Every structure is written in structure tokens, then in C-alpha cells.
Image: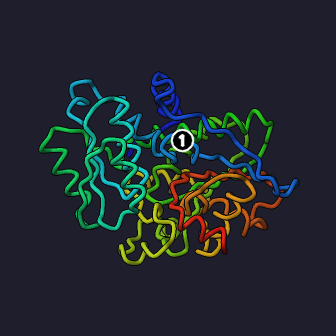
């Protein structure tokens, strides 16, 4: 199985760069204000993207590389949240039809955001998402853009890793730990590819909720382990309930150094910390890396840590609840 490479990441960045202000923004590395000076925490706020999450990178790249005739027939996705919004945004950018198949349980705010961008929303049962999206794409001759199980999507996400590598090198760091949220594995697979050209010694660690720790179990077993939908959807981090595909797990098995987990209380505390101390709005899925650093600092010693804040699409009630904790 061919993995996404650093060259693929660079090619994707060039293509995305041609979109100008319609494309993703280059997010900075921001120092957390109360981080230990001996073990600084640097935040990569993908929550600042136009759609509020890193998913915009993969969706735009997968759409941009289509030939014009194929692209004109539209794009289709299945998603419970941020990927839906990203594909809707891609449809608007390229002026093409975008259809998103969502589970009935999808967060209302994320679905509304995709609809506001002009996407057609098709609600189904959770178990029917992929099959219904495939049927729609085949019937219309449209391009199905999966949330992670696709090389062009992962190459787009890899631009996150390229930016981290450049900023690490610019800071003159010789060693760094990079924490990345893990769900379907598209982001961490891409970040691994993007970091491949970094001059510093990088330890790449995935982070997921304890209540959806299928990837950690699979990582240590050396093979994919299946968790039922019910077993991995009780976490407040609703964006981290997917499971890696064979494609993304191949990247994780070969390129990731470790997978760690955080508790629900730790996730909630991190959401509040990011809002109150860092002035960053993060959804629970995006806050797991900050939670890992704040509650597992003994593991990194004095090594600087980069925490990817993957998204900030959180509803007001959930944010207020985290601030009250």
C-alpha cells in the first residue's frame, strides 16, 4: 500500500495556494501563556480556518485535483460534522453541487453550517451513511470525497504537517513532540507525511478519548481492532468517533510513535483552558491534545510540545458547560 509522502504534501500545498483567499489559511504556532518555560506548549489552531477546522484542507484539495468535467457533476460526502462543512465550502468555492449525507444524530450546529453554505443535506441512520453517499455519487456521476480514506484528502491534511515542520525549524528546535487528535486517522497520517522533511527530531503522538480508544488498542495490537458504534460514541468529543481505515492505519502503524488517551473531565478542562487562558475556542475533539499535554506533562519532560487544535466548532451550551467545570 502506497503511503502519502512529503512530496505529495508539497504538491498539495502548491495546488491549495493557487486558490488564494478562497483556500485554507496558514495557521501559526502560538505559545500557551502559562506553559512551563522548560517544556513549552505551542498550539497549532486549525480552529481559525474559515470552516472552523482542518478539514477544509483535504476537501478543497480533493476537489481541486478533479478534472473540470468530473468536478462539474458535483461532490458528495458522508460526515457528522466538520467534513460536511468543509465539503460544502468546497462546493461553494468551485461553484458546484455539494451533497452531504449525515446521521440523524449529527450536531445540529454543524449540519446547519453546511446547509448555510449551500450543501444539500441527506439525513440517514448512522449505519447507512457510507452506502447512501456511495449510491448518490454513483447515480449522479459525482465525486465521493471520504472524510479520511482517500490519498488526495490526506495529502491536503498533510499541509498541516508542512507548516509545523517549517515553524519548528524556524524556531531552531532540535527535538519536539507533536500531538495530533485521532479519529479516522486522516489528519495524523497527513501530519506524519508533512513532518517528514523536518530537521528536528520529532516524536509524533496521537491522542483520542478514553471512551473511543479503538486506535490505541489497534496500535498496540499491530492490527485494526473494531469497536461498536455504541462503544465509541459516548464521548463528548463527537468528532473523534470514527475508526481508521486500512489506508490510514498503515500510516499510523509505520509513522506514529505512540497513541495516548484522555478522560472526559480532562477534555472539558482543556476546552475551558483554551478559551479562558489562550483566547481560543476549541471543540472537545480539538482540545484532546491540549488535555494530553496538561495532564501528561511528565511524559514529555523538557521537550517542547506542539498540540494541534483541530477544530473549534462547538455549540454555546457545550462551551459554557466547559467554562463552568
Front residue (pair 94, 6) = 94
Front residue (pair 152, 1) = 152
Q: Quadrant of residue 167?
A: top right
Q: Quick one: which residue is furthest to the right in this view? A: 37
Image point 64% across, 55% down: which residue?
Answer: 179
Front residue (pair 224, 110) = 110
In the depicted structure, whether residue 16 falls above or below residue 293: above
Classify residue 197 as left or right of residue 7.
Answer: right
Q: Give the quarter of the figure containing the C terminus.
A: bottom right
Residue 94 image position (x, y, % from top left): 34, 29
Residue 314 image position (x, y, % from top left): 52, 59
In the depicted structure, whether residue 8 falls above or below residue 18: below
Classify residue 43 as left or right of residue 37.
Answer: left
Image point 76% across, 32% down: which residue?
Answer: 170
Dot 1 crowding, Cα within 10 Å, few <14, some 14–19, many 20+: many
Q: How many marks?
A: 1
In the depicted structure, whether residue 73 falls above or below residue 307: above
Residue 183 image position (x, y, % from top left): 47, 60
User: Which secondary structure lies at badge 1?
Assistant: loop
Image point 14% across, 40% down: which residue?
Answer: 140
Q: Please name the colour scheme applied to the rendered image.
A: rainbow
Q: Quadrant of residue 205?
A: bottom right
Front residue (pair 98, 158) = 98
Image point 80% across, 36% down: which residue?
Answer: 172
In the depicted structure, whether residue 194 falls above or below residue 206: above
Q: Quadrant of residue 68?
A: top left
Tag 1 residue: 49
Residue 15 image position (x, y, % from top left): 45, 25
Amino acid at each position: 500500500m502506497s503511503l502519502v509522502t512529503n512530496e505529495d504534501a508539497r504538491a498539495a500545498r502548491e495546488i491549495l495556494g493557487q486558490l488564494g483567499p478562497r483556500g485554507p489559511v496558514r495557521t501559526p504556532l502560538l505559545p500557551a501563556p502559562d506553559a512551563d518555560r522548560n517544556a513549552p506548549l505551542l498550539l497549532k489552531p486549525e480552529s481559525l480556518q474559515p470552516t472552523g477546522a482542518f478539514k477544509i484542507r483535504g476537501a478543497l484539495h480533493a476537489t481541486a485535483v478533479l478534472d473540470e468535467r468530473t468536478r462539474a457533476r458535483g461532490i458528495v460526502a458522508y460526515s457528522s460534522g466538520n467534513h460536511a462543512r468543509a465539503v460544502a465550502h468546497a462546493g461553494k468555492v468551485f461553484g458546484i453541487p455539494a451533497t452531504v449525507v449525515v446521521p440523524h444524530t449529527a450536531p445540529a450546529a454543524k449540519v446547519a453550517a453546511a446547509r448555510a453554505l449551500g450543501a444539500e443535506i441527506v439525513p440517514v441512520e448512522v449505519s447507512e451513511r457510507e452506502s447512501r453517499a456511495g449510491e448518490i455519487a454513483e447515480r449522479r456521476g459525482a465525486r465521493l470525497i471520504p472524510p479520511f480514506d482517500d490519498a488526495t484528502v490526506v495529502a491536503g491534511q498533510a499541509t498541516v504537517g508542512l507548516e509545523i515542520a517549517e515553524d519548528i525549524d524556524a524556531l531552531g528546535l532540535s527535538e519536539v513532540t507533536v500531538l495530533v487528535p485521532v479519529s479516522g486517522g486522516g489528519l495524523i497520517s497527513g501530519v506524519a507525511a508533512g513532518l517528514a522533511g523536518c530537521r528536528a527530531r520529532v516524536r509524533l503522538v496521537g491522542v483520542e478519548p478514553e471512551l473511543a480508544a479503538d486506535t490505541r488498542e489497534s496500535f498496540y495490537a499491530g492490527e485494526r481492532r473494531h469497536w461498536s458504534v455504541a462503544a465509541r460514541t459516548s464521548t463528548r468529543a463527537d468528532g473523534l468517533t470514527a475508526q481508521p481505515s486500512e489506508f490510514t492505519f498503515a500510516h499510523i502503524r509505520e509513522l506514529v510513535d505512540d497513541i495516548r488517551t484522555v478522560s472526559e473531565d480532562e477534555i472539558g478542562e482543556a476546552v475551558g483552558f483554551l478559551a479562558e487562558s489562550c483566547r481560543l475556542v476549541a471543540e472537545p475533539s480539538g482540545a484532546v491534545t491540549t488535555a494530553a499535554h496538561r495532564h501528561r506533562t511528565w511524559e514529555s519532560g523538557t521537550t517542547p510540545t506542539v498540540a494541534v487544535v483541530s477544530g473549534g466548532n462547538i455549540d454555546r451550551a457545550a462551551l459554557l458547560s466547559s467554562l463552568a467545570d
